[in-house]
Image: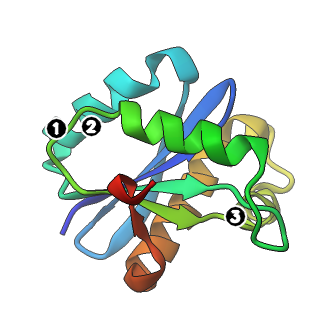
Amino acid sequence: MTALGVDVGRVRVGLAVESAGVVLPLRTVSRDEAIDEITEECIRRRVEVIFVGLPLNLKGDNTASTDDSIGFAKEIKVELPIRMIDERMTTNIALDISKGRKSAKAEVDSLSAAEILKLGLSNPSLAKDINGF
């Protein structure tokens, strides 16, 4: 299965891909370009499912970013399952991975998308269909 991971931010959106069991960060794109980039990646890579990060606070409650991420996911117009996955701590993991690199700031969003994708693939029962929001 080929899957796409998406880390939604207010300014940037990180993308990651899984194919043949390997999860790789792709790139970070501007929020304005993100929907088109996601659509193109889905076609180019024959994506079968998209996992979008669902930002919750440490107690598991919604935040202002939660509604923003859900709204963004609903803007993705592809005929694929779009699943929301709790993304708590993915940015911290990405920051740890990228420490010491000059390009770290640009990489964090795509590394976070890779962590979101790993979570969604390893715990599919935790992912919620976008139609449930």
Q: CA distance from mark 3 to mark 2?
A: 22 Å
Quarter occupied by residue 55: bottom right
Q: Position of residue 61 (x, y in %)?
A: 77, 65
Q: Position of residue 90 (x, y in %)?
A: 69, 64
Q: CA distance from mark 2 to mark 1?
A: 5 Å
Which amino acid does the dot numbered 1 rest on? Arg
Which amino acid does the dot numbered 2 rest on? Glu
Residue reaching furthest to the top: 32
Q: Residue at x 19, y 50 (%)?
A: 80
Residue under circle 1?
A: 44
Q: Is residue 120 above or below residue 8?
A: below
Is the residue under label 1 in contact with that under label 2 (CB below 8 Å)? yes
Residue under circle 2?
A: 41
Q: Is residue 9 above or below residue 99?
A: above
Mark 2 nearby-residue class (10 Å; few <14, some 14–19, many ≥20): some
Secondary structure under the numbered disc 1 in the rendered image? helix
Q: Residue at x 76, y 41 (%)?
A: 64
Work out whether residue 8 can be spotted.
Answer: no
Nearer-the-camera pick, 92 or 67: 67
Residue under circle 3?
A: 90
Which amino acid does the dot numbered 3 rest on? Thr
Q: Residue at x 25, y 32 (%)?
A: 77
Q: Earlier in the sequence, mark 1 or mark 3?
A: 1
